[in-house]
């Protein structure tokens, strides 16, 4: 049963081939057996999962039916879950039990999804490797010596290892798409505002967006259907009708205009990855797509702009973790200043402290105009580049990452080298666009992903292209040895 996709599980439950409780117990046993190799879970919610599975079975017995009713998933551990530890991968929140459910959690629970647990992540979603977690690094099931990507590496590793069919994740600068690429999954970052951020612990509020991680575009469509929609509790959530994402999966690609940005294929891209990207383009051309070269001239400024804006927002968002109201508190503070300093110094890891300091510096008097304001101007130029490009093409295609998954610890002493792994993904966050990564092959046994970008609220188009591609390729069906 662990090899079934979300769509296959929905059909199996509807046909009464197995119950949700049977499936849930099978996957829980698999997590207990295999996850010690991966460290992909922070918390396994066995009692909750079984009770939700029994409730889903009862709903089906009463005649109810739905694609997520009884389907097992897991949540990245920054989605608040009532009464369950929500740690954000940090010592700061190791003892925090959320008093409410995030909107994403409650929407999926209402749809009947079964929560198996909370997945490991880079601390406060800051990282590209899932090595900064307080609970230790997550390992890539394709090669346990390598990283799975971050910050949603726990969700990615768990799904890739067939511990469960799908999981929620978040993307601030590529944290759904990059781990999807490095673990041979399909991962979708929706348009900013498409999925509610209420109850999702913030890293950078103008960039964060929740989305699905699964093995296929079809499964991502099902999970996004349950996650998306307007939420009055989130002031940045957009009141836009949610289409039936599954209905357009099989649309023809005849005449689809695909843009290849020339900036994506310069120095820094592993030529073996470039070859697989070109191979995926050829497959899409066979399906009727038309390809042309385009330009995104301000892409070169994306990383410096992102690493001013994101840390600046993080320094503001993380100021609430001060040892006073909730979370970690140092022992025996001598005064309030000592409480603040030691609680934050002991509760936050190195990468989080680094980004808080960078962000506080960028926002400080005398530097706001020179750094933060300039970065926001570049952000607008990047968005303008995309708007101009989408006047010429329907989707933009390129590599998801410039390199293969690297060995655990290989970039610990060079954070900038790790930041550069997000070079192709961060522009979608800066512009607020939807982006998807899909499996496109392997190099030396390690997965490679191809990224698709589309205009605002065109997630259905991305899912359609990926689904049609997955009907003529088998990269997404391959499983790592031993899992």
Image (cartoon, rainbow, N blue to C red):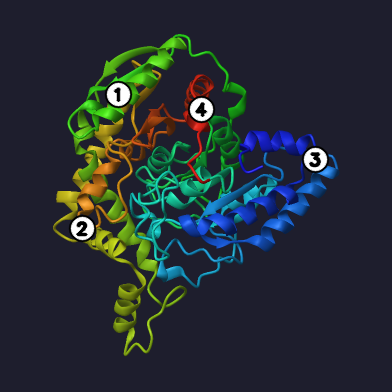
Q: Residue 463's mark?
A: 4
Residue 210 point in image, percent of width and height: 48, 45
Mark 2 and mark 1: span between their CA atoms? 30 Å
The spot of residue 230 in percent (x, y) is 56, 42
Q: Nearer the viewer, residue 470 or 447?
A: 447
Q: Residues within 10 Å of mark 4 (few under 14, many from 20)?
A: many
| N-term-proximal mark, 1 vs 3 | 3
Where does the N terminus fall, quadrant-wise? top right
Mark nearest the camera among 2 and 1 is 1
Q: Earlier in the sequence, mark 4 or mark 1?
A: 1
SS for tag 3?
A: loop
User: Callout 1: few (<14), some (14-19), or many (20+) C-alpha neighbours within 10 Å?
Assistant: few
Give the mark nearer the N terminus: 3 vs 2: 3
**Residue 39, percent from left and from top:** 47, 58
Q: Is residue 275 above or below residue 133?
A: above
Q: Is residue 235 visible?
A: no
Determine which residue is flagged by label 1: 275
Image height of 219 relative to 337, above or below: above
Q: Nearer the viewer, residue 279 or 359?
A: 279
Distance from disc 1 to disc 3, alpha carbons, whole Å, reads: 47 Å
Residue named by callout 2: 413
């Amino acid at each position: 049963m662990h090899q079934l996709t979300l769509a296959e599980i929905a059909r199996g439950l509807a046909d009464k081939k197995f119950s949700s409780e049977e499936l849930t117990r099978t996957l829980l046993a698999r997590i207990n057996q295999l996850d010690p190799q991966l460290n992909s879970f922070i918390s396994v919610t066995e009692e909750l999962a079984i009770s939700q599975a029994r409730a889903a079975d009862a709903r089906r017995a009463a005649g109810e039916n739905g694609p997520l009713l009884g389907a097992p998933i897991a949540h990245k551990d920054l989605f608040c879950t009532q009464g369950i530890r929500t740690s954000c991968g940090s010592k700061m929140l190791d003892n925090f039990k959320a008093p409410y459910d995030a909107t994403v959690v409650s929407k999926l629970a209402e749809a009947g999804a079964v929560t198996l647990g909370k997945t490991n992540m880079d601390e406060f979603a800051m990282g590209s490797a899932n090595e900064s977690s307080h609970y230790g690094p997550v390992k890539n099931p394709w090669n346990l010596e390598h990283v799975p990507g971050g910050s949603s590496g726990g969700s990615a590793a768990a799904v890739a290892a067939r511990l469960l069919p799908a999981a929620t994740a978040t993307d601030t600068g590529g944290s759904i798409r990059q781990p999807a690429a490095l673990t041979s999954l399909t991962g979708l970052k929706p348009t900013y505002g498409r999925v509610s951020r209420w109850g999702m612990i913030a890293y950078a509020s103008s960039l964060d967006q929740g989305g699905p991680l699964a093995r296929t575009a079809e499964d991502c469509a099902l999970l996004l259907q349950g996650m998306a929609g307007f939420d009055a509790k989130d002031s940045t959530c957009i009141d836009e009708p949610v289409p039936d994402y599954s209905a357009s999966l099989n649309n023809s690609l005849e005449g689809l205009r695909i843009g290849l940005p020339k900036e994506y294929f310069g120095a820094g891209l592993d030529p073996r990855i470039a070859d697989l990207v070109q191979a995926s383009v050829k497959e899409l051309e066979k399906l009727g797509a038309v390809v042309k070269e385009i330009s995104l001239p301000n892409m070169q400024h994306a990383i410096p702009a992102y690493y001013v804006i994101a840390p600046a927002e993080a320094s503001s968002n993380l100021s609430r973790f001060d040892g006073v109201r909730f979370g970690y508190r140092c022992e025996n503070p001598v005064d309030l200043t000592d409480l603040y300093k030691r609680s934050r110094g002991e509760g936050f890891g190195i990468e989080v402290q680094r980004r808080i300091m960078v962000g506080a510096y960028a926002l400080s008097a005398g530097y706001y105009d020179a750094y933060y304001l300039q970065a926001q101007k570049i952000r607008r130029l990047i968005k303008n580049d995309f708007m101009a490009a989408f006047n010429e093409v329907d989707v933009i295609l390129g590599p998801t990452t410039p390199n293969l998954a690297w060995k655990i610890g290989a970039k610990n002493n060079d954070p900038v080298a790790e930041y550069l792994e997000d070079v192709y993904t961060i522009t979608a966050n800066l512009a607020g666009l939807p982006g998807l990564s899909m499996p496109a092959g392997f190099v030396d046994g390690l997965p490679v992903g191809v990224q698709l970008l589309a205009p605002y609220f065109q997630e259905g188009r991305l899912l359609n292209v990926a689904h049609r591609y997955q009907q003529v390729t088998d990269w997404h069906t391959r499983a790592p040895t031993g899992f």
